[in-house]
Each structure stands twice: as C-alpha cells, then as structure tokens.
Image (tube, grey):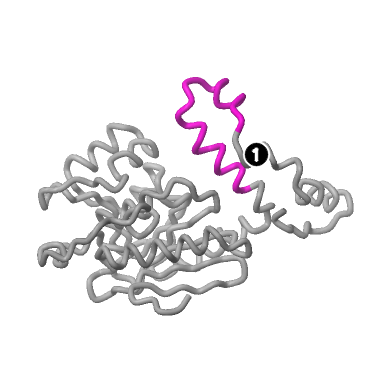
Amino acid sequence: MDGLLYSKVEDRGRIRIVTINRPEVANALNREASHELEAVWNDFAANDDLWVGIVTGEGDRAFSAGNDLKAQAAGKRGPRPHTGFGGLAMRCDLTKPVIAAVNGLALGGGFELALACDLIIASENAYFGLPEGKVGMMAAGGGVQRLPRVIPQKEALGIILTGRRVTAEEGRRLGFVNEVVPTSKALDAALAWANQILELAPVAVRAAKEAVYASLDKPTLEDAIRATYPIHSTLSSTEDFIEGPRAFAEKRKPVWKNR
C-alpha cells in the first residue's frame, strides 16, 4: 500500500506484516494513525491472496504505548474509527487469523490491540498494562471486556484496577501470551507461527476461528456444539474440503485454493 504515514506494510506471500511506525512516540497512535491502520486491515480482509496477518511495532522499545496523549492534550482528537484503536481493537468480524508480535511496551490501547489478535508472541522485554486510570480514563477500546474473557476474572481485575505492568513471562503464565522469545525475535517467532497456520486450509482455519469466538456467548456447551456457524456451514462445499483428504491419500502436501 502507498501513501502510509504512520505504518509500514509488507506482504510476504500469504502473510501481511503491519508495523506501527511511530518510534519517536513509542508507537503511540493518534486518531489519524488509527484511521490509516483501519484502511490497512480493511484491505487485508478483502484480499483473497492474504491469509494471515501480523502486527508489530517499529524498534524494540515499544509495540505501542497506546493513545497519543500529547496529541489528545493538544486538542487533536477526531472521531474514532469504527474498528477502534489501530484498526483492530474493536473489529469483531475478521475471520482471518492475526498475530501480535509484541516488542517492548504494550500499554493501554497497545494492550487492547494485542488482545484483539488471535495469538500474542512477546519478546522478553515486553510489558503489558491498562494504565488508563492513572490519567483519568478507562480502557474503553475493548481491554476491560476482552481481558476477563481470556484470563481468570480476579487476575484481570488485578491488572485493570491497579494499572500495573505485567511482564511477558507473567502474561504467559496467566494465559494471554502464547510464547515468550528473546528480545528482537518476536517478529521471527510470529512468522514461524504464521507459517504453521498456512499449512492448514485457510477456509478451515477461518471456520474454526469463527466457531471459537461465536460459541463463547452460548449458554451451554451443547448449544455451542449444535449451533450453526456461517463459514463452517459452507466448508463441506469447498474444493479444499476434497483436496485435504485427497492429498492425505496420495501422500503429498495439499495445495490449498481457498475456495
């Protein structure tokens, strides 16, 4: 994509890598940056050739320190994009998997952005937190809703109500971090995860993701199992549904067509 001011986009085959590029402010985002990233992720969602997304921050200091408070204090505060902070924090209809490669600080909106991803890979120097209360605000971009759905409620409240920072290792123990890697290696590790995902049929991956999230609000396990999910209901009619068993029988790698 051309004309980007606040981010860098690189497409490597089926993978889109989106880098927040504001290292001078610890990759904090103003409203213009979030609108730009919304367009980047809209393009990713619509592109049939792209199957997995990765979001990271420029440099080792920060993934994203959250909302650009200096811009807000200066009165530079336009409308928030429909999809929220970084174009992802309030996006709930993206069936393609997205991985957060977290390097350094992921605070406030930065933590919300990471939580909006399906997997979080964190470097050893990563710190997570929702410190909005310290500046008279709350994590209104999905943080206070998502975190208690990912980790135990009391653990989530301990983070939310104190605004404290959580290390990468503690995040791994609590369950919101998938892997902790050496500093500067988060993107490499995220790419390794992405390539593992690419070994699976993309339609099957999206059906599974859709079923996981859509089933969370079902009242019982039986309701969740018996529910019909849009993508899963069409899975058996795809070419990939035949290609997988055929490749297995022929002892070769499947060639996914995403249709």
Residue drawn at point x = 30 percent, y = 63 percent:
64
Query: Is 24 or 182 nearer to us in this picture?
Result: 24
For this orientation, the residue located farthest to the right is 250
- Amino acid type, mark 1: His
Q: Position of residue 222 (x, y in %)?
A: 57, 20
Q: Residue at x 36, y 61 (%)?
A: 124
In the visual, does 226 lie left or right of 18?
right
- Residue 40 x/y as whole percent: 44, 66
| Residue 191 x, y percent position in the rendering | 54, 65
Q: Is residue 246 above or below residue 190?
A: above
Q: In the image, is 190 to the left or to the right of 250?
A: left
Across the whole image, how many numbered discs are drawn on residues?
1
Q: Which residue is mark 1?
A: 232
Q: Is residue 226 magenta?
A: yes
246 in magenta: no
Q: Is residue 196 above or below residue 227?
A: below
The image quadrant that residue 61 belongs to is bottom left
Q: With 251 as the anchor, is 195 left or right in this view?
A: left
Q: Is residue 127 visible?
A: no
Q: Which residues are magenta?
A: 205-228
